[in-house]
Amino acid sequence: MRRAEGFSLPELLLAALLLGGLAMVGLGEAARCVARQRVESAARRVALGLELGRAAAQRQGAPCGLQLSERGWQGPESGGSLPACAGVQLALGEGVAGGAVQLEHNLPPEVRFTSNGLVLDGGTVRLSAEGSDLERCLVMALPLGVVRLGRWEQQGCQPDPSL
């Protein structure tokens, strides 16, 4: 008598269970990776917005201002002391699967740039996203507006050797 070839029902169920578990682990890791990329991208866009503001002030030959919010960089709302830096509107969340990035900062409501591109305001920006333990920070020091990107740890912006 010849035995039928193939897998038994318990073997098939075990294989399906193992594949399902591996898929769940992979999906969880993928979600963490996307959240991390959101934070990295937003941090680069904050720094880029500052550089674009400097360049716009130099190009215009006149002082200008920008405002940083959850939506990103844009011209100051009405009542600002300076005109908006021309051509600088930069969303923080573009490019990485849409999703919210949490933003905290102590910048003034209007970041001001001189006509020769110097930044008149300093502060710290902190960025995070749900699903990732990475928190990026950006420190802008005066008087030259030097920008340093780091990792937020222990209530402060620390240098990140991976950058």
Image (tube, grey):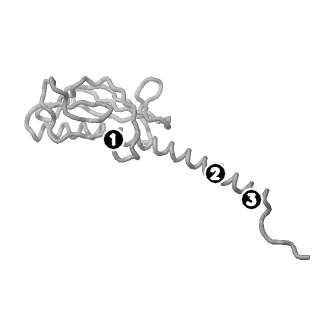
Frontmost residue, 104 versus 139: 104
Q: Secondary structure at mark 2?
A: helix
Instruction: Give residue 15's position: percent from left, percent from top.
Output: 72, 57
Q: Is residue 84 above or below residue 5?
A: above
Crowd class of label 2 (few under 14; some 14 to 19; many from 20; radius 10 Å)? few
Horizontal arrangement in the rendering, residue 24 relative to residue 42 (left or right): right
Instruction: Give residue 74's position: percent from left, percent from top.
Output: 22, 35
Frontmost residue, 81 versus 147: 81
Q: Which residue is mark 2?
A: 22
Q: CA distance from mark 3 to mark 2?
A: 15 Å
Residue found at x 25% / y 38%: 49
Marks 3, 2: nearer the viewer: 3
Q: Which residue is mark 1?
A: 44
**Reading the chain from its start, which is encountered first: label 1 or label 2?**
2
Frontmost residue, 29 versus 97: 97
Q: CA distance from mark 1 to mark 2?
A: 33 Å
Q: Which residue is mark 3?
A: 12
Q: Secondary structure at mark 3?
A: helix
Crowd class of label 3 (few under 14; some 14 to 19; many from 20; radius 10 Å)? few
Which amino acid type is marked by label 3? Leu
